[in-house]
Amino acid sequence: MKVKQYLCRLVAVGVSLLPISVMAEQVSLQLAEQTLQVDTDHGLKITLSHASQVKMALEDVQFNYQSALNWKIKRQAKNEIVLQASFKPGVEFYRTVNDNQPRQAILTISKVDGGFRFYSAPDWGRQVKLKLKDLGSHIFGLTEGLQPDNRLSPDLRNATVHVDVNAEEASIHENYASAHSAFFMSSLGYGAFFDTFARGTYDIAINGYHTIQHDSKTLDWYVFPGKNGAQIHKAYFALIGAPKAVPAWGLGPVGWRDQNDGGAAEMLDDIAKMSERQMPFTAWFVDRPYSDGTHGWSQMNFSPLFADPAKWINTMREQYGLEFMTWTTPAFFGATPFAKHLDGDFSYIDVSDAQSQQAFKQALVDKQLQFGVKGHKIDRADEAFPVSEKWADESVLPAYRRNLYTYLMTKMHDEALRSVWGDDQITFTRSAIHRSQPYLSAIWAGDPRTSWDGLQANFANAARSSFMGFPVWGTDVGGYQGEGYIPQDLYLRWMQAGSMTGLFEIKLDGAGGDGRDRMPWQYDDNFQKQFKHILDDRMALVPYLYSLVHTSAQTGTVMQPLAYRHLDDKNTYQIWDEFYVGDAILVAPVFTPENQRSVYLPEGNWRDFDDPAVRYQGGKRYDLKVPLVKLPRFVKANSLFVSGNLYHGSDKIWRADEQPTLTIHAFPAVKQGETQFQYVDLIDNKHKTISLKRDAKQLVVNSPAVDYARVFEVVTDTAPKTVVLNGKVVDFSFKQQQNLLLVTSDSQDDLRLQVTF
């Protein structure tokens, strides 16, 4: 009787009662509507399916390039399946000549938050290879650089991609676009992440398989099912940690020169001239050389040209409303100021040495942060890196070093900044790796060519970065390579595209200060007018961008390629030159000298951003004429976004008397529908849900309380009969030509807007 009761209890907690010798050859795990089935009848086959569709089929797990002799199901519980594999003795590299015992490996498959984990750690492991059957899926992610053949398309079918932070100048576009990740996304509706810093090689859709190989001692692989990139990345971020948010001052226009021969005085003069022309900026940074020592950097201080940094940094902040950042690197170019460096021309600091890492952080605090520096543009780690030099942490094998170094470099800078400024600081790098996201504010996409080709390739880099799960990305607007002064049309098109990225940083001179600079006053009045318009437009979108970066762990990356949002739409897989910003806005910049382009709009109903009276039916491609003053943007029906003058940088000088106002842009569904926008108030940093609902007779917009005025800007093709705000009929204006209803309120309470037709 006792035995029977015990067996009943085992069944109740989900433990299989089958002994190993007679264990079933097929078992499964269920996660919501997803089924993971394991079959060991003939070798190994693990499938992930939804309803009748197979999304993923894993057909081999190899260690040290050898397949197992056999696989057995050792145990099954409610949330876990345990497999045992037997390998030939020769799978162990260092076995003795008389050791002929088969080697065993245990593979545990378990349910985790939002997905499944595959884990195995045989003590003799050196490499892991996974073979997934090619089911016709399209694969995105893995690399920011345009591996393997400089294709612009984010679709990696028939490609071999290396996941190792390494850059060789000018071989892969764009130059030093060096973010990598062992994460990819499949068009069949899942993401996959190999949790290791060991270098990897991915063969996509080659010889009938997607093959994943890492020089890792351990298999630690995750699969996250999802309908779109945001759902998939939500599970991914739950594992690695929420991405680091960006303060509001990092989301406006950021200016810089590559060469500041005039020192601090030149920077202040540039800012003053921008302000005189009412061209707003929220931050500025200095690139090297600005320090003493080798390469204008190794002493990490401010040289005599930048003397008394506390004074001029305070002037930037108090007089002009700008925050200030500096260029940094863990490379010291022959100098060795810390206890442990890695041998080589760049004499990288050994970030695995605790004493050296702490001394580096303290040097940043003592020589920069205490004077008001609030952020760092972090360079190198992808260039001339000495893989084979001895680390203080001898447990780190060469195969892990490039990627792990990049991660530790980013984390080290964030810790230094956080010790002084808390969350009010920024780190942005050109080399990045998975798991850096909690310490990394943004990626800057290397050193693009100053040409139309460079502009195109850099935005192809952006698409890949989004799929990898780096929420904020930015380009050197105007390009890095070559002389400063560039054609007006190239400059303005780059400004337009850059203004819709997460990090809007504008390079105002040539590489190393080469040639005539590209300050806006070097161009004619019409150019300056458009330059200012783009900056003003960006400032208005800061509240929207702030909300997106502060909710990216739930809503995905700021820039979302079309395939990211529409994994089931084959028309999106090759598109690199369009992207969403949040749920509402689709951006299609012009990347050629011609004032026209073809635009694909996904399913749904769309309106022109600048003229909502112009409508488009989704699921089609449109050939549009685009004058130089126009940035093609479209807004999806049944969506919300916000804009406003809630944050001021240098524009505080000429906008000091303006009333802070948030504009809620509502684009209702055509007939009926409802949606929400997670608004993060940059004044009190609270999350507030704005909602929109439309049916045949009325639409309703709900807005939580805020500390400033609001304008409701509602798109409607029909003039309303009545407009009610919090139960009271109110006055409104209706712009017939633009199909816009406008309602203004100074109330700071919760507001409910009801519009009847």
Image (cartoon, rainbow, N blue to C red):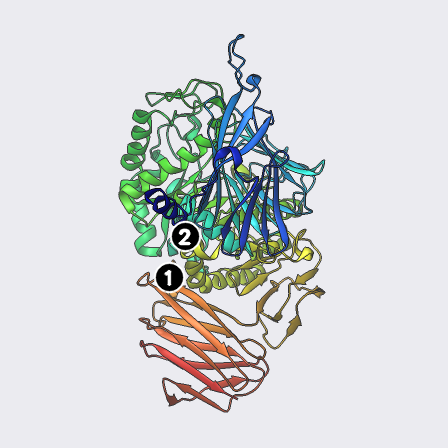
Q: What amino acid is at disc 1?
A: His
Q: Whole-percent x and y of residue 103?
A: 52, 21
Q: Is residue 170 positioned above or below 151 on the image?
A: above
Judging by the rendered image, the residue that carries numbered circle 2 is 250
Residue lying at 38% horizontally and 32% vertically, measured from the top left: 291
Of the two numbered discs 1 and 2 on the same chain, state the one appearing first in sequence.
Answer: 2
- Say few, some or many: other residues with alpha carbon within 10 Å of mark 2 (under 14 / 14 to 19 / 20 or more): many
Residue lying at 32% horizontally and 52% vertically, measured from the top left: 317
Q: Whole-percent x and y of residue 538?
A: 48, 61
- Among the 4 quarters of the image, the one containing residue 729: bottom left
Question: What is the count of numbered marks?
Answer: 2
Which numbered circle lies on residue 21? none
In the picture, measured across the screen, residue 145 lies left or right of residue 680, that is right
Secondary structure under the numbered disc 1 in the rendered image? loop
- The quarter of the rendered structure image containing the N terminus is top left
Q: What amino acid is at disc 2?
A: Gly
